Image (tube, grey):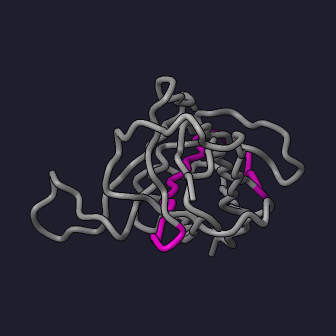
Amino acid sequence: VPVVDDFSNVGAGSINKNPGAQIPVTAGEVQKLVYNVGPIDLPAGTRAEQSLKKPAILNFQVSEDVWMIGFTPKIVDDHGNPLAGGLLYRAILINKQEENPTCKTGNNGNPFAIASGTLTGVSLPKNYGYAILKEDSLEAQVVLTNESEEDLFGVYFSFELEALPMEK
């Protein structure tokens, strides 16, 4: 069973109902909110189909209302050293407070960030952001794979949300 850890001690995260909102010019300085899902042990030959049945989960919230302006995913070992992106099948960040407009049945929240083995970061255009409120419940669902012949221990999916505090 994976253990969930938040090394940053930042708190938990959430989102607002207006994803493309323009950020007021008076927003504060950029914060880097780092969350870690793990450690996860990956026996040799672990396939995505196996991991999909029981993804690693992190429930979190932010400590204050912010505008998310970027998202950077990583796969690291228990010392923070980068590991191959190919270990990540997929990671989805979900706002459990919002309904997914494309899912009419069995709605489990609205995905707002997704990562794959390419580990591509995202930066929103200048003056735009995705609102994250401290009251919202967020969840990271992570599916890892290890098609090598070597067991891997202490693997983490780490993600950084770049955020600006909202105006008070």
> Residue placed at 67% from the left, 40% from the top?
74
> Residue placed at 49% from the left, 43% from the top?
89
Q: Quadrant of the N terminus?
A: bottom right
Q: Position of residue 49 (x, y in %)?
A: 40, 54
Instruction: Using the image as rendered, state which of residue 51 and residue 63 is in the foreground.
Output: 63
Q: Is residue 1 above or below residue 153?
A: below
The quadrant in which residue 59 appears is bottom right
Instruction: Using the image as rendered, state which of residue 22 and residue 57 is in the foreground.
Output: 22
Side of 86 where 39 appears, left or right: right
Instruction: Using the image as rendered, state which of residue 97 and residue 133 is in the foreground.
Output: 133
Q: Is residue 165 above or below residue 20?
A: below
> Residue placed at 48% from the left, 38% from the top?
23
- Total numbered badges shown on the rendered structure: 0
Side of 28 where 166 appears, left or right: left
Which segment did they paint magenta? Answer: 134-154
Q: Position of residue 130 (x, y in %)?
A: 44, 45
The quadrant in which residue 39 appears is bottom right
Question: Magenta span has 147?
Answer: yes
Q: Residue furthest top?
A: 125
Question: Magenta span has 149?
Answer: yes
> Residue placed at 45% from the left, 33% from the top?
128
The quadrant in which residue 3 appears is bottom right
Q: Position of residue 47 (x, y in %)?
A: 49, 49
Q: Residue furthest right?
A: 79
Q: Position of residue 84 (x, y in %)?
A: 68, 33
